Amino acid sequence: MVLCLALAPVLASAAEEAESTPAAQEDEDRIGWVVVEASAWLPRAIGAGFDAALQTSVTDSYDSRLASIEPESSESGRYRAGYSLSRNLGDIMVTWWTHEVTQRRSAYTPGVFQFGELFVNPLMAGVFDDGLADGYDAGSVLEIRDLRIDYSRIGFESQRATLRWILGWRGVTHRQITDATYYCAFPVYDGTPIFFPIPADSVLAPAPDVASGISRFNGNGPEVGFQIDFPLHPRVRVEAGLVVAFLDGTTDTSYSSRTSAYYVLVDLNSPAIDYFPLPPFPEFETTNEEGEPYLPLLRQLQIPIQIQASEQTTVQVLDSNLTLRWKIWRELEAFFGVKVTRYDGAATEIRAKAATLSANGVYNVQDATRVRKTTSYEGFLGGLTYRF
Amino acid sequence: MRRRLGGALFAIALLAAVCGCDTNQPAQGSAANAQVYFSGNVASVAVYDVWDAKLVTLTYYLSTPTAPPSAASLSLGLWCDVPATVAEQSRIPAGYPFRYQVTIEKIPAGSPTPILLSDALYEDERALASVTEYDATPLVPLGDHNGILVSDTVSTTLGTRTVVLVELTNGRRVSTASREFLIYPKIAQTAVPSYGSKCPIGGFGNASSANAFPPAAVAGSSPSFGVELATGDTIVVRAKKDETPMTWVLYNSQNPPAFSSTLVVDGRDVSGTVLGRTASGAGTDEAIAYSYTQR
């Protein structure tokens, strides 16, 4: 976009020069023209947000806010190339667009457990098993590759508008990776801290709760649409288009979560769990009835949960644009407009819904949910087209 | 006209390129000076009058009564006596020494990872190199004691008279929380022979070496441990009492010593606003843990 603006004075001068010379005679025997187009699109991915944590207010329990990661606008290149046949035999165009946006968000309030752990499985989440952390770090990576091969031809033409119909094939790969880590920097429960041994014992240091999810769709299918040109001036026209595609493909999703819980061994000679202590875990500094410290008997149980799924899916793509095109020099056009591309159901989120933990430390997932999400890329588009 | 328009567009593009740069700048703000203190206290502490004791053996030769005797001496450590009145036998100390393990960490703003600021030496339960303040009450000088005659024997066979006595010099009144009292070996009241000494049994940490009584310090820094805190930084302090202090010989109160910590930031005591516990329970192995985030 910036490049386009920077080149504007040069191109304007060139257009002025072209106007002062006689227009080149078009070769009637010519088969057609090569068309190349480069543009910069600045889209924002709507609907690809990721709720990393629930921030609760320390003073007002009704004032809880979602800490979401919403992808910001980021520029990516969109390229088209093809051949435009003469005598209205149609255009064959290949369009390539790839986009990646990475976002991270974190907050830390050591000792103040105000972040609800939304992304991990709730089973034993949080150092005090209450699903709260005093810090988190979460991120989202959104990637898309979109390839189109289209054939278009004029279906209707008048002085005021030209309509082209479009038929084509489209292949899309869409991937979203999300992750979150929830920390316990300084564990305090209702004013009482956990008294960890000194020097620190890495086995008993509170392990952060972590979760990650991956959704990957890969599919292709036919597309159909139209494009209407409205001439405003011999050199300026407005272009509006709408294309719908139905893609058959496979969606692979996975989700993993790891939480942990303290437990007390029956004795040092047995791995059997005696019980799960309650916060603030006085076992860290007290002794049993025999006067022996609990500390050597304390352990930390890791609870990993992982789900994977793969399914055949159909994704609907809706592509629309509204563009102002300006012929600035001979067959060189500059354009600027708005473009919206909607991928319906391209991302799938899978979660373990219910998990249980028995007294002897055996855990089990009893249900899982899958939610399909729609992502729309919306933003301004600008670039240059040259035909030769 | 077009050239002007082009020039204007070029200027806008240049402006956008300049203004659109990444504006993430490091946070500005002055650092606060945090000081971590530790202290130990009991309701009262025992007071003793002590002298440097030396066992002296004088040998006189009966054949030459005017000649000076040959002398041999052996240092015995401190000899104790109990002050005459009950009121003098105890006092509230200014400080009560207690050895402890300690870690002082800083969690920088925007990070979950603590950085250990104190040396690992001060975590070692065998070293216990951190000590709370001793009783710094000025010593009351008592002068020399009369000394104690142990024996006076005459040997006609050898032609000698041997006098054994305990010389008591450099008297001073000290409390059992005083470093002056703790660092010296003492003649315990149960020792054989005790020479009448009333020194309590054992000692601070049951140690006999002066190395066991280092100057009062928090992780090697005296009188407090300093930490620089920028806005958003968190200090985490953890400490644990010596598990085998043998404190019962050090005071005459039934109440065990209280162990507490104070955090002062830029001269202001913020101990009341920290998260966690700044004072331990009564047990010998209880602990302190607290955090404070600079806002």
Image (cartoon, coloured by chain):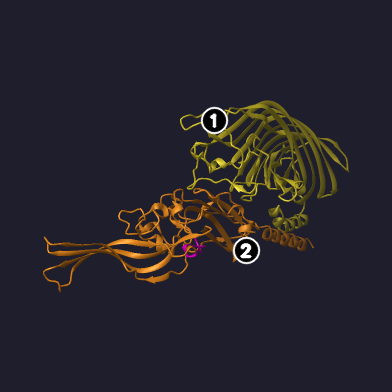
Chain painted yellow: A
3D distance between C-alphas at marks 2 and 1: 50 Å
Element under disc 1:
strand
Left or right for B96, reference A49:
left
Q: Quadrant of residue B74?
A: bottom left
Query: Disc 1: which chain?
Result: A
Q: Quadrant of residue A81?
A: top right
Check if mark 2 and mark 1 are on a common chain.
Answer: no
Name the residue beneath numbered marker 1: A273
Position of residue A61 measured from the top left corner of the image (x, y, whole percent):
75, 46
Q: Viewer-proximal residue, B271 or B63?
A: B63
B268 versus A388 height, above or below? below
Q: Is any atom of residue A136 visible in this view?
A: yes
Q: Is any atom of residue A88 visible in this view?
A: no
Left or right for B24, reference B59:
right
Name the residue beneath numbered marker 2: B29
Chain painted orange: B
B89 inside magenta stretch: yes
Query: Which three-letter amino acid code belongs to the residue tagged 2?
Result: Gly
Element under disc 2:
loop
Position of residue B178 measured from the top left corner of the image (x, y, whole percent):
44, 63
Bin the neighbour count of mark 1 within 10 Å (Cα to Cα): few under 14, some 14-19, many 20 and up. Answer: some
Q: Viewer-proximal residue, A201 or B60?
A: B60
The residues colored magenta run B87-95
Query: Which three-letter amino acid code belongs to the residue tagged 1?
Result: Ile
Left or right for B202, reference A180:
left
Bin the neighbour count of mark 2 within 10 Å (Cα to Cα): few under 14, some 14-19, many 20 and up. Answer: few
